[in-house]
Image: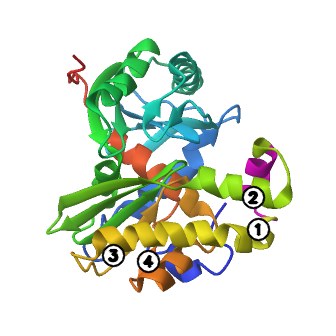
Amino acid sequence: MREEQGDKAAAGPARGEAGMNPRLGEILEAAARTVVYDGAEGPQVSYGGELHVGVDLGTAYTVLVVLDEAMVPIAGAYRFSQVVRDGVVLDYMGAIKTVKELKAQVEARLGRPLESAATAYPPGVALAEVRATGYVLQGAGLECSRLVDEATAASTLLQVGSGVVVDVGGGTTKLAVIEGGKVVYTADEPTGGTHFTLVVSGAMGIPFMEAEALKTNAAEQARLFPAVKPVMEKVATIVSRHVAPFRPARIYLCGGSARFPGMARVIEEATGIPTCIPGEPLFVTPIGIAMSNFAGETAPLR
């Protein structure tokens, strides 16, 4: 699902721009080829070098991605999974099951086991909940190498020199203000893709999962746009409030909810700040998480 609905200008820069990762386009294009939806047949991989693994436990989607030593995606899988809400693991056993099954799918393609992974949490989540994400990895047979906040993970891949990285996830909107190549401010507030689905469910009078399927159907999105636009505007209000003191020159959108056509345009119009979606937004944060995973490291979980 790409920005077919008038976001073509906003969807760039696919291959980076001044102050951004010059390999961004290459990396995201590789992710689009190798990270597949749950159950889909992905390409087999023959690779014996160092692996970097990231697990993104989202409110709507759980993503597991594997990078090679050059930090390029070579395998991965994701599925719709409501085991987390606003950064809190609500279904611990369900989360473990999801990660374990995604791990098995990816291992079958790689022909080798995955031993460790990094994972992430929304900014401002309580320490106990942050640790819970690490315990999920352990329960799935992965050593938790590092815990990073989601907005910083996204900026790790984008390598933005200056601006705001906004990760619009399933349940919350996370943002990181970057100045001089460093994250100087982070925030996280409720409102994300789940709210899009709830609005569609109410407007159409259909169950949540039917609304989710409708929302992600590219053929239906133009019809649904008027219903979800107020949620997009709420996201823009959240971003505007947090970034006002910093006066950023550009907003970089990522996260699964940024896939909905028109999202960048609505935020740009509401904030007055040029807004772009760099490539496939769903994979930006998971790849940034994986870039933090190195063999031999262990995150403190106690």
Secondary structure mostly taken by the magenta-highlighted segment of the chain: helix
- Spatial separation of the CA atoms under disc 4 and disc 1: 22 Å
Q: Label 3: how many residues lie within 10 Å, few (<14), some (14-19) or many (20+)?
A: few
Q: Earlier in the sequence, mark 3 or mark 2?
A: 3
Amino acid type for the residue under numbered disc 4: Thr
Q: Nearer the viewer, mark 2 or mark 1?
A: 2
- Spatial separation of the CA atoms under disc 2 and disc 1: 7 Å
Is 82 magenta? The answer is: no
Q: Earlier in the sequence, mark 4 or mark 2?
A: 2
Q: Earlier in the sequence, mark 4 or mark 3?
A: 3
Q: Secondary structure at mark 3?
A: loop
Q: Position of residue 25 (x, y in %)?
A: 44, 63
Location of mark 2 (residue): 200
Location of mark 1 (residue): 224
In magenta, the rendered stretch is 210-219
Amino acid type for the residue under numbered disc 1: Leu
Q: Label 2: how many residues lie within 10 Å, few (<14), some (14-19) or many (20+)?
A: many
Quadrant holding the C terminus: top left
Tell whether label 3 touches label 4 (CB within 8 Å): no
Q: Position of residue 301 (x, y in %)?
A: 25, 20
